[in-house]
Image (spheres, helix red, strand yellow):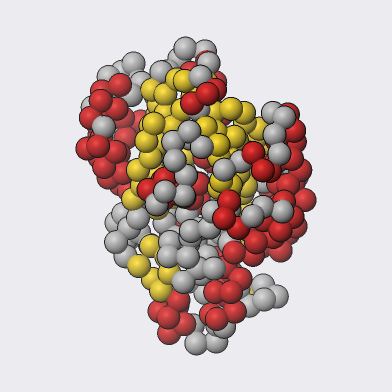
Amino acid sequence: MSIKINEIAYYLPEQIITNEELQERNPTWDLNMIEKRTGVVKRHVAYEHETALDMSFETCKNLFSLHKEAQEKIDGIIFCTQSQDYIIPPNACILHKRFGWPDSVFALDINMACSGYIYGLAIIQGLVSTGVVKNALLVNADTYSKYIHKKDRSASVLFGDGAAVSWISASDKSSGLVDIQCETSGINYERFIIPAGGCRMPKSDKTSIPESDNSGNVRTKENINMDGIEILRFVNSRIPKQIHMILKRNMMTIDDIDLFVFHQASKTILDSLRRQLKIKSEKFYQGFSDIGNTVSASIPIALKDALDCGKIVRGDKVLISGFGAGLSWGTAIINI
């Protein structure tokens, strides 16, 4: 038993911040150089009162307006976020309440970042294969803007907020998930971290003190602390190996894939991966210039846009790959 993606919907906040606005706020930033490296020219940012749960609720309503039967069939919710409304309870349970689903619906949060779509698919695959669920929602939503210091050039120019919801159900491999692989390098957990705010380091006056790194990025211990250079090295060393491995395991080559959709991390990372893997540009999706890096929502947003613009059609073979905090990474081959 496998799974298939029936439909994807997504939501982007109304508020938009352009590179020109960032330049006005930070006159010393070289945004032309930043744009060349990140590929981002503007990003959607949640309002102060708007949460990942709110965005996901709107996304679900959008999906259910197109597929009313989905709302009635749902018996499982996997909510991937690092922007929970509360420490307790999980967002999935509150989403369950908002739609008034019966008690029999399975609901679970997972705290994953940019690899979260792949990990979510793996979890749903397990739930479907064991008969726990038949129709699941995979929700991917984050508001990283609330975790980023406004003077942190490396992060504030890169990330955007957004939510995506995928309706997933049981299938066979001919019309769904062909194979999936997830991996973890916990030794590198500090490469992408918010140090303060949990039980290990509770928030305090000390954790709110701004500090500058060698590149002039300003952060507190309550903000995202990202080691961009080491993450780039990590991605370059791990992702191509995993992709080659999963292709070989399924007796495929790069040429057998109709479209490669990677986590839309940055132009630098995507260009590097495309060169290493020798993927033709027409088979490689890049579409984040107007929305930024939307964390675990980036892959489903890209899949939806690729379908809508005709870059892929139902039945095409797509390889998706996500990588991020943990550090964690995963790759899947799907018949879309």
Q: Position of residue 242 (x, y in %)?
A: 72, 40
What residue is rendered at 42% in x and 45% in y? 307
**Viewer-proximal residue among 46 and 243:** 243
Q: Is residue 92 visible?
A: no
- 281, above or below 53, in the image: below
Q: Position of residue 176 (x, y in %)?
A: 50, 27
Residue 332: quarter of image:
top right
Residue at the (32%, 35%) spot, across then down? 95
Q: Is residue 180 above or below residue 115?
A: above
Q: Residue furthest bottom?
A: 27
Please report the residue visible at 61 percent of the width from the left and 71 percent of the height from the top: 37
Q: Quadrant of residue 140?
A: top left
User: How many numbered dots are placed on residues in this image?
Assistant: 0
> Which residue is at a point 74% across and 40% down the rendered structure image?
244
Report the side of 273 relative to 320 (left or right).
Answer: right
- In the drawing, does residue 168 fall left or right of residue 179? left
Let me know if residue 95 appears in the view. Answer: yes
Residue 317 placed where, x, y %? 55, 36
Asked if residue 30 lies left or right of residue 165, the reply is right
Front residue of 278 and 288:
278
**Residue 131: x and y, percent?**
47, 12
- Seen in the picture, residue 126 relative to 138 is either above or below; the reply is above
